[in-house]
Amino acid sequence: MQDNEKIYKIELTNEEYEVLENLKTEFCNKLSKMSNKEITEYLKSFYPEQNLNFEKEIKGITYKVNTYFNIDSEYTILQRLLRIFEK
């Protein structure tokens, strides 16, 4: 763990935990059957690019944020998601 990382503990009932685990498993199974390109397109459908590109003004400075998907990435989205789920 890095110094700037925070750990949050969420207490769930067994039933809530099982629901989340089932959702995670279904999602991972769905993604595991897709190619990298299919996964990229699938996730883009949740977050259309125009919504990911935005400008935000903070203390008089305007920041412009652009998001790009790299289909030639070394890691698949599934690998990244699994890493997040493992934490």
Image (cartoon, rainbow, N blue to C red):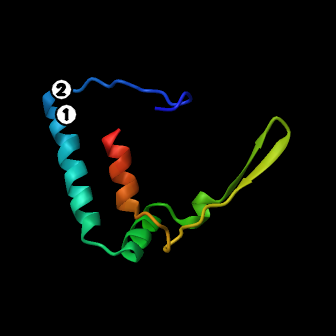
Q: Quadrant of residue 13?
A: top left
Q: What secondary structure is found at the residue carrying circle 1?
A: helix
Q: How many angstroms separate mark 2 from mark 1 (CA)?
A: 5 Å
Q: Quadrant of the C terminus?
A: top left
What residue is rendered at 66% in x and 60% in y? 66
| Location of residue 5 in the rendering, given as x and y in whole percent from the top left corner | 51, 31
Seen in the picture, residue 72 relative to 4 is either above or below; the reply is: below
| Location of residue 80 in the rendering, given as x and y in whole percent from the top left corner | 40, 54
Q: What secondary structure is found at the residue carrying circle 2?
A: loop
- Residue at the far right: name it: 60
Depth check: 46 or 76 in front? 76
Tag 2: residue type? Thr
Seen in the picture, residue 46 relative to 82 is either above or below; the reply is: below
Q: Is residue 80 left or right of residue 17?
A: right
What residue is rendered at 29% in x and 65% in y? 31
* Residue 52 numbered mark, or none: none
Q: Is residue 43 left or right of residue 49?
A: left
Residue ID for mark 1: 16
Tag 1: residue type? Glu
What residue is rendered at 38% in x and 45% in y? 84
Residue ID for mark 2: 13
Tell me if label 2 and label 1 are in contact, CB under 8 Å: yes
| Location of residue 14 in the rendering, given as x and y in whole percent from the top left corner | 14, 29
Q: Residues within 10 Å of mark 1 (few under 14, many from 20)?
A: few
Q: Quadrant of residue 8?
A: top left
Q: Quadrant of residue 18?
A: top left
